[in-house]
């Protein structure tokens, strides 16, 4: 490695990709597998790079050719040093209310204050005015979108916790992600697959070390539409 720090190299590469003309592409995908802590990942020189410095440059305000297009970030790294010991799984079911509880609920409903017709008319007029104010406000900014819209940050684990990796088969999160995409990408949208990944990591993996530790992925979505990797499949 040259004299430049990994942080400089990562940000230099990000800036290079950010400036690229993405007009001919439908989607942007960024994946990184490394070590990390909450809010940052490590470069090859063991220096930290903030997640916001990786994601931020691809916002619509700084990368206009990706405006309105899905920007997906898959982040395989620890987010702390805590271990999840898990809890015993149970099949929870809704418990129907007893006759006594139902009676108490009805009594509470009867005790609710009533609104007379005059107050009701005033309330309706107020709501209509609020709706008109909102419509005017919406019309004035309908041509804009939030700069951080249409993004997905798929973290391997929740804040503060470690992310597990098998020495032969790789990280639990990446295993589940690749398997799910291969099996379901032609039939499911991305967020449905991410939910499958959550379930697979949560249930199918467990550390062999003392404590039988678990892991929970933590996707953060700012997507505004469903994303299918094979949209032509539905024509």
Image (cartoon, grey):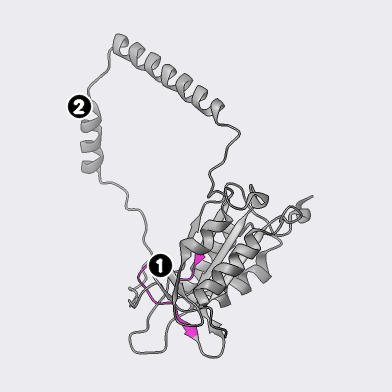
The answer to which of 207 and 106 lies nearer the viewer is 207
The image shows residue 17, relative to residue 65, as above or below, that is below
Q: Is residue 94 left or right of residue 50?
A: left
The location of residue 44, given as percent across then percent down, is: 51, 82
Q: Which residue is mark 2?
A: 111
* Image-quadrant location for residue 191: bottom right
Q: Residue at x 42, y 85 (%)?
A: 207
The location of residue 112, given as percent across then percent down, is: 23, 26
Residue that lies at the very extreme toward the top in this rendered image: 118
Q: Residue at x 61, y 47 (%)?
A: 225
Tag 1 secondary structure? loop
Which contiguous range is marked in magenta? 154-165
Disc 2 crowd rating (10 Å Cα; few below 14, some 14-19, many 20+) is few
Q: Is residue 181 left or right of residue 162?
A: right
The answer to which of 53 and 211 lies nearer the viewer is 53
Where's the N terminus, which quadrant?
bottom right
The disc at residue 158 is: 1
Q: Is residue 136 left or right of residue 14?
A: left
């Amino acid at each position: 490695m040259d004299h430049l720090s990994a942080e400089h190299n990562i940000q230099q590469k990000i800036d290079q990709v950010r400036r690229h003309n993405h007009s001919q592409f439908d989607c942007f995908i960024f994946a990184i597998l490394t070590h990390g802590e909450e809010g940052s990942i490590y470069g090859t020189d063991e220096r930290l790079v903030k997640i916001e410095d990786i994601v931020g440059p691809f916002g619509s305000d700084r990368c206009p050719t990706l405006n309105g297009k899905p920007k997906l970030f898959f982040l395989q790294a620890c987010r702390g040093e805590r271990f999840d010991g898990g809890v015993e799984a149970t099949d929870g079911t809704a418990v129907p209310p007893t006759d006594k509880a139902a009676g108490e609920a009805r009594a509470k409903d009867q005790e609710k204050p009533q609104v007379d017709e005059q107050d009701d008319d005033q309330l309706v007029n107020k709501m209509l005015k609020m709706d008109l104010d909102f419509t005017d406000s919406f019309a004035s900014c309908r041509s804009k979108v939030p700069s951080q819209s249409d993004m997905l940050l798929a973290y391997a684990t929740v804040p503060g916790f470690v992310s597990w990796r098998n020495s032969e088969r790789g990280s639990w999160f990446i295993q589940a992600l690749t398997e799910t995409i291969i099996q379901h990408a032609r039939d499911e949208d991305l967020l449905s697959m991410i939910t499958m990944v959550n379930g697979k990591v949560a249930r199918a993996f467990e550390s062999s070390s003392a404590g039988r530790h678990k892991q929970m992925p933590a996707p953060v979505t700012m997507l505004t539409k469903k994303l299918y990797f094979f949209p032509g499949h539905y024509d």
